[in-house]
Amino acid sequence: MNEVRGSALLFTDDPRIKAAVAEAGFVPQIAGVCSVEVPCLREETYTLVVIDETTGRETLAYLRGLSGSRRRALFVVAVNPRGPTGDRFAAWSESADLVVTPGDVPNLRRLAGDGLREKQEFYRRFEELRRRWDEEHAKIKALVLMYKQKAAYNDGLASRYQAAQ
């Protein structure tokens, strides 16, 4: 049995997609259970969202308006009959993380797994760099404050303080 990786909200009733999502270790929930699709995304937290692009335009539009931190928590797969699988530009233009053609649905387990890992690694690295930047920024602020305090009683450091500002 697969390890449960999180819950998945499916905006499609394709049984192949539901099976592939379950095989990938996600607990699939068909959005049709909710009276309106978008409230499902507001009320619960999902790891994976699979949208049939031909019927899910409203949902994709809603995803564009999510805050960055909320959107980062979702991995969105758009099932699109027009573009090639893995087309990053098509995914970006659809506010998705991955575009999959209906013919590649059997590979969804691998594609979504690889894409989710890449996204998690990207944001792990992003958070690490942001943490480092915050540390360096705090050091610079402390240095400027030190120059300000010393410039108050030492004319020789006044020019250094002005340069540090």
Image (tube, rainbow, N blue to C red):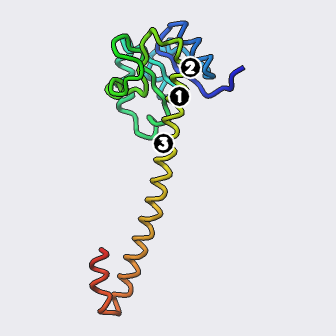
Which mark identifies residue 109? 2
- Number of the front mark, 2 or 3: 2
Separation of residues labelled 1 and 2 (CA atoms): 9 Å
Q: Are marks 1 and 2 in contact (CB under 8 Å)?
A: no
Disc 3 crowd rating (10 Å Cα; few below 14, some 14-19, many 20+) is few
Which mark identifies residue 123? 3
Where in the figure is residue 2, as x and y percent of width and height?
69, 22
Separation of residues labelled 2 and 3 (CA atoms): 21 Å
Where in the figure is residue 117, as x and y percent of width and height?
54, 33
Q: Are marks 2 and 3 in contact (CB under 8 Å)?
A: no
Q: Which residue is more in the foreground, 143 or 106? A: 106
Local secondary structure at mark 3: helix
Q: Looking at the picture, which amino acid does disc 2 mark?
A: Arg
Residue identified by numbered label 1:
114
Disc 2 crowd rating (10 Å Cα; few below 14, some 14-19, many 20+) is some
Q: Which residue is more in the foreground, 6 or 19? A: 19
Reading the chain from its start, which is encountered first: label 2 or label 3? 2
Q: Residue at x 59, y 11 (%)?
A: 19
- Number of the front mark, 1 or 3: 1
Specify the quadrant that holds the N terminus.
Answer: top right
Which mark identifies residue 156? none
Q: Residue furthest right?
A: 1
Q: Which residue is more in the foreground, 75 or 117? A: 117
Q: Is residue 26 left or right of residue 154?
A: right
Q: Is residue 45 left or right of residue 151?
A: right
